[in-house]
Every structure is written in structure tokens, then in C-alpha cells.
């Protein structure tokens, strides 16, 4: 969805409903688009942090668990990936923040819960053999895959994804994701801000404020 006004609380409520899903009726992801003229890279990263805080508050309200950073990183990358879930806790949320770029790329999201329901007698039959990287033919996931244009030289965008592994005791349902670079050009940049959030006990001691400060103020861009 394109946002004309950046009002975090209502945005977060919409995202929470779609991403923190308990059934496959919800997509498990949300795509937010922001006009380049509205933002600087610093302000864009600030929005990601504000969304994290509000999503954490909503998760505490519903599930009595908060969100804490597994990692925060900026990288300049033009690499295709397989369908996968990022390495994190069994229950986690991924925010990918794309800065304006001329590099054509797309993000594909595959609902492995729907796939399990269709391809196996029971979901547990698939979940018992689940691996963080999908090692079978991608064509099997095609009916359950959504594609997002993850490049635009006039807009910033954030994709929020349920990155959880399938476990019987988890509250929400995850997705696979993969990056596809459509026109690689190493003379140009494709900067992505990656934020992985673990779902943890409200009592757990974290260093989130320290990590946020480094993320906001660092000029380091990983390759």
C-alpha cells in the first residue's frame, strides 16, 4: 500500500493484522511504499524502528510477548537467493527496507503452510521434514507465491514478513521469501535495510536501544 501520511500507529495495526497471522486467510506479509521526496535514508530507518516498537506493543497486547532485534544491518547486494526463512528464533518477523534504486528486482513470498495443506496428507508430514531453505523444485510453490516489485528509483518501501518456522506451539504462521535480481549492474547500488525481530518473553533483557542507535547513525553498508 502507498502511504500519503506517515502515521505509525494505524500503519502498524494494519501490518499486525496481515503479518502476525494465525490462519492462512491472512497473507503473512505487508508492503508499504513511501514517496522519496518525503524521506532521507535516516528518516526511513527511523520509520522501521518506530514500526518495530509499535508492532512489539501490539504483540505484547495479543500474545504477551515482545519483539527484540536478532539483527539490524544495511547491505548493498545484487544476489539471487533460494526460498528460505532467515536464521533467527523459531518465531520471528523480518522487515526489509528498500532504498530507491535503479536495479530491477523482485521479492517472492511463498506460503509454505498452504503448500503443506495441498501437497501432504497432514501439515505435520511436511513440517517434520521442513528445512530453512526450500530444497525441492520451486515450481511446487508457484501456486502459493506472491511477487513484489522491490525496486523503484522514486520510492522507499518496506516489506514486513512473518519469518517463523513451523512449530506446533507457535502463535503465528510464517512464509518463505527469495530475492530475484532482474538486471544486475554492479556499477549501481541496491541498498536494503534488514531487520530481524525475535519474539521473546517480556521479561527478557535486551540491548535494543543500543542496536537502534548504531543502525540509525552508522554509515557502514555491508556487501
Image (cartoon, helix red, strand yellow):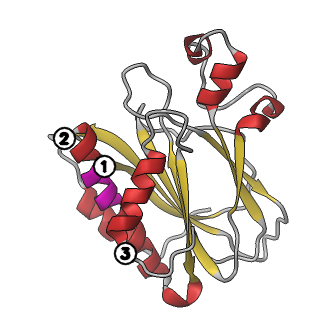
Q: Which one is earlier in the sequence, the residue at label 3 or at label 2?
A: 3
Q: Nearer the viewer, residue 94 or 70?
A: 94
The quadrant in which residue 123 appears is top right
Q: With 182 as the anchor, is 70 left or right in this view?
A: left
- The answer to which image quadrant residue 10 occupies is bottom left
Which residue corresponds to mark 1?
A: 68
Label 1 – label 3 distance at C-alpha: 22 Å
Q: Residue shown at 49%/80% (left/top)?
A: 41
Question: Which residue bears the numbered disc 2?
Answer: 204
Residue depth check, mark 3 versus mark 2: number of the one nearer the observer: 3
The residue at 78%/76% (across/down) is 187
Q: Nearer the viewer, residue 204 or 33?
A: 33
Can residue 13 be spotted in the picture? yes
| Number of other residues with Cα within 10 Å of mark 2, as a class: few under 14, some 14 to 19, many 20 or more | few
Judged by its main secondary structure, the magenta piece is helix
Name the residue: 35% across, 70% down.
Answer: 8
Where the N terminus falls, by quadrant? Answer: bottom right
Q: CA distance from mark 3 to mark 2?
A: 29 Å
Gap in Å between the C-alphas at discs 1 and 2? 9 Å
Q: Position of residue 46 (x, y in %)?
A: 38, 74
Residue numbers of the magenta segment: 52-58
Residue 214 appears in view: no
State which tag comes first along the sequence, 1 or 2. 1
**Which quarter of the rendering shows the C terminus?**
bottom right
Locate residue 36 relative to residue 119 in the image: left or right: left
5 above or below 63? Answer: below
Tell me, for residue 196, which label it has, or none: none
Amino acid at each position: 500500500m502507498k502511504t500519503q501520511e506517515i502515521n505509525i500507529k494505524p500503519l502498524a495495526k494494519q501490518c499486525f493484522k496481515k503479518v502476525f497471522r494465525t490462519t492462512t486467510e491472512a497473507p503473512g506479509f505487508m508492503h508499504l511504499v513511501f514517496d522519496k521526496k518525503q524521506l532521507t535514508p535516516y528518516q526511513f530507518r527511523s520509520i522501521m524502528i518506530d514500526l518495530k516498537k509499535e508492532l512489539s506493543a501490539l504483540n505484547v497486547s495479543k500474545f504477551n510477548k515482545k519483539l527484540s532485534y536478532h539483527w539490524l544491518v544495511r547491505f548493498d547486494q545484487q544476489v539471487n537467493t533460494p526460498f528460505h526463512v532467515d536464521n533467527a528464533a523459531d518465531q520471528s518477523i523480518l522487515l526489509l527496507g528498500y532504498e530507491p534504486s535503479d536495479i530491477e528486482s523482485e521479492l517472492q513470498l511463498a506460503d509454505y503452510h498452504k503448500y503443506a495443506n495441498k501437497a501432504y496428507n497432514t501439515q505435520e508430514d511436511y513440517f517434520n521434514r521442513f528445512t530453512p531453505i526450500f530444497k525441492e523444485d520451486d515450481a511446487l510453490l508457484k501456486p502459493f507465491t506472491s511477487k513484489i516489485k522491490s525496486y523503484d528509483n522514486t520510492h522507499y518501501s518496506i516489506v514486513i514478513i512473518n519469518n517463523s518456522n513451523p512449530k506446533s506451539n507457535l502463535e503465528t504462521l510464517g512464509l518463505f521469501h527469495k530475492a530475484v535480481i532482474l538486471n544486475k549492474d554492479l556499477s549501481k547500488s541496491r541498498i536494503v535495510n534488514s531487520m530481524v525481530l525475535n519474539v521473546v518473553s517480556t521479561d527478557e533483557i535486551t540491548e535494543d536501544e543500543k542496536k537502534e542507535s548504531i543502525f540509525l547513525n552508522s554509515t557502514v553498508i555491508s556487501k
